[in-house]
Image (tube, rainbow, N blue to C red):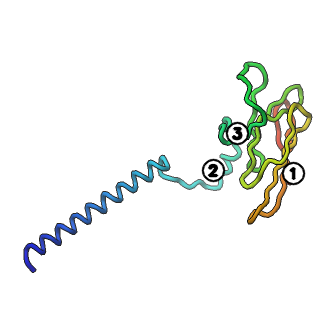
Amino acid sequence: MGSRTVIAMVGWLVAAAAATVVGLGAVRVIGEGITGTAATTLTQEEVAEALASPIPSPSAAATASLRPSPAPTTSGPPPTPLRPAGSTITAHCEGGQVELDGVTAPLGYQIVEYDRGLTDEAEVRFERGGKGHGNGRLEVHVTCVDGRPRATVDD
């Protein structure tokens, strides 16, 4: 083999190694840019703790609002987020009665019916169906207990 051939092969190997390193670095940077940070896996205990903790407030994109948002006021009780059976329901209590402020259906379900306005017990009905999901119905009842909304689930 001639010296030119050896130099060409070494040059090609160096170029291939450099391209591999640059490519791997680019994939890492792009991956972090898409996800924000490296993904981590939660334990069952961490998931249960996260589901049990109250949420600060549902985002507008994730909440199906039951009524148009009124102008913010300083009077009246603040809505309380509840998470029964994978749904998100915000409600507040006034004078021992409950009023629903917003409802988001659990994954795979749709909101079928819900009570509006102040009532002793607000009911939300969810149904699922379609290919691969089976048919199902889920009812959530919201009442006021000690001045705070509480949800119970009937399935």
CA–CA distance between discs 1 and 3? 21 Å
Q: Callout 3, which amino acid?
A: Pro
Other residues around mark 2 within 10 Å, as few (<14) / some (14–19) / many (≥20): few
Q: Say which label, 3 or 2, has the lower sequence index.
A: 2
Q: Secondary structure at mark 1?
A: strand
Choose top left, top right, bottom left or bottom right for residue 116. top right
User: Few, some or many C-alpha atoms within 10 Å of disc 3 (few <14, some 14-19, many ≥20)?
Assistant: few
Nearer the observer: mark 2 or 1; the answer is 1
Is 130 in front, or is 100?
Answer: 130
List the residue tagged with mark 3. 54
What residue do we see at 75% from left, 27% from top? 78
Tag 3, which secondary structure? loop
Q: As shown in the figure, which amino acid type bears the numbered disc 1?
A: Asp
Residue 125 point in image, percent of width and height: 84, 48
Q: Label for residue 71?
A: none
Disc 1: which residue: 154
Depth order, front residue of 11/154: 11
Camera-side mark, 1 or 3: 1
Whether residue 152 is visible here, answered yes or no, is no
Instruction: Give 42 or 115, whichever is nearer the viewer.
Output: 115
The mark nearer the N terminus, 1 or 3, is: 3
* Residue 52 rendering spot, x and y as whole percentages: 71, 45
Would you place residue 70 above or below residue 58 in this image?
Answer: above
Residue at the extreme top of the image, as rendered: 74
Q: Quadrant of residue 58?
A: top right
Asked which secondary structure carries label 2, the reply is helix
**What residue is pinned by disc 2?**
46
